[in-house]
Amino acid sequence: MTQFTLADLEKRIEERARASAEQSYTRALIDKGAAHCAKKMGEEAFETAIAAVQEDKSRLVSEAADLIYHLMVLMKVRGVSLADVEAELDRRTAQSGHAEKASRPKG
């Protein structure tokens, strides 16, 4: 089992964000802005969903990795850290999923 973590991915994205767009796909994505990054993440989410239904486990793993990477690039562009998301997940786990969902604003 690998020791690679989402925190490692966040660090790698931060490092690659400091490179030039010619050297780094991550930097090229960031330079195109949040809307482009969101579109890419949406494409990866769709591909992940298709893989979950129609393809084998290895394809799902590959697409899930793409999705997580693109989500974390989008988070970087929008100034959201992994710690921010972890704090929100921690807050949510203090109650049942049904209760947490019911507590969200409607709309």
Image (cartoon, rainbow, N blue to C red):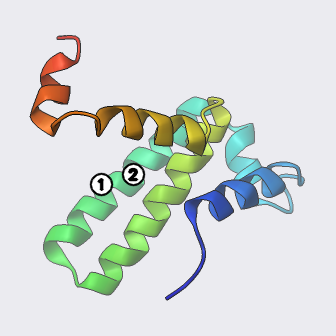
Q: Is residue 74 left or right of residue 93?
A: right
Q: CA distance from mark 1 to mark 2?
A: 5 Å
Q: Residues within 10 Å of mark 2 (few under 14, many from 20)?
A: some
Image point (33%, 80%), residue name: 59
Image point (62%, 39%), residue name: 81
Kind of element beneath mark 1: helix
List the residue tagged with mark 2.
43
List the residue tagged with mark 1.
46
Q: Is residue 94 visible?
A: yes
| Of the pair 93 and 82, the residue shown nearer to us | 93
The answer to whether residue 82 is above or below residue 60 is: above
Image point (21%, 69%), residue name: 52
The x, y position of residue 22, in whole percent, is 86, 58
The x, y position of residue 35, in whole percent, is 54, 31
The x, y position of residue 33, in whole percent, is 66, 33
Amino acid found under the numbered disc labelled 2: Glu
Q: Is residue 103 left or right of residue 63?
A: left
Amino acid found under the numbered disc labelled 1: Phe
Image point (31%, 63%), residue name: 48
Q: Is residue 105 left or right of residue 72?
A: left
Q: Residue furthest bottom?
A: 1
Kind of element beneath mark 2: helix
* Quarter of the image where the C terminus is located: top left
Whether pointer 1 and pointer 2 mark residues with C-beta atoms closer than 8 Å, the reply is yes
